[in-house]
Amino acid sequence: MSRKRTLMPEFYKKKKVCTESRSKVPITDAEREEVSRVPTDTEVYLLYFKNLFPLDKFEHRLPPMVLKHQLYSLNKNRTVVDKELNDLKNKGLIKIFKIGSEFDEYAVVFTEDYRCHVTRVMAEVSVPKSIADKFVNTIVKRCNDVYVNKDTLIKEYSFKDDDITQLLKATVLTNRTVGSWWLAVPNTGMFMKSLLRGRKAILTMIKKSKYKEILKNDLEQRKLPKMCRLGLTYHLQDIIGADLILSIQTTSGQLLRLKD
């Protein structure tokens, strides 16, 4: 079994399919489809990172968010990861978002988690239910792009100017260019602040180590700064996937080395 597989919790490993005869109970099309559907590695990794996300640390004001490049830390074949992400997006299982104004980074959120999140946020800021429902039933369900323009909102999805104002108020849309908006996850600023602070803190810890490298086991023994509230594993997969450090397997364990 490869190391990638051993990283996965038991919960996400393939389940054994019962082979007992069901001759007296016909199998429905839905059951046949469910049995035949085997999750891709990328979907398994997404579930793994979703399980790592500390919702309580953000007072449940965010859905579980996975950085796209974190997936590259578990599968070095980026072409495969991108293809499987695109398939999941086209099936409506995930949404992909551009995050951070200064960084070319993308976050992945399961569609159902996003739907629940934006529904709650729009209710909190008093967006009329008719507009909130329309957003969920059109943009959330049908739009696979990371941004949307005014013509699409008005002509394809039947939004009005006042509706768009309400969506901007709820921050489910954020400014991109004139007449164009990013699809967004409300409260992403909280996530970005924690991500960047934690990333900087761990990179500093590695930089201050001898030869600018440290064994992962030794790093785990150190007390993390409070700013690393996403957790060590989440932050490490972030900086490995972003190519900020090298991860080298040695006889002593996984070695983390700062890139020149």
Image: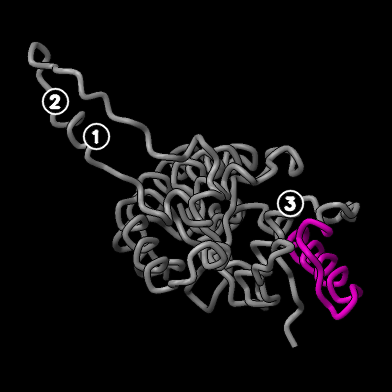
- Which circle's residue, 3 or 2, is located before the other in the chain? 2
* 181 magenta-colored: no
Q: Amino acid at mark 1?
A: Val
Q: Which residue is mark 3?
A: 230
Q: Where does the image place residue 72, in percent across and percent down from the top left?
A: 52, 67
- Which circle's residue, 1 or 3, is located before the other in the chain? 1
- The part of the image, by quadrant, that contains residue 137 is top left
**Which residue is at the front of the view, 114 or 194?**
194
Main SS, magenta residues: helix
Q: Where does the image place residue 116, in percent across and percent down from the top left?
A: 52, 38
- The part of the image, by quadrant, that contains residue 103 is bottom right
In the picture, the disc for residue 35 is 1
SS for callout 1: helix
- Which circle's residue, 2 or 1, is located before the other in the chain? 2
Q: Where does the image place residue 61, in percent across and percent down from the top left?
A: 68, 42
In the image, taking residue 209 as reference, residue 189 lies left or right, namely: left
SS for callout 2: loop
Number of numbered discs overlaid on the protein picture: 3
**Mark 2 or 1, closer to the camera:** 1
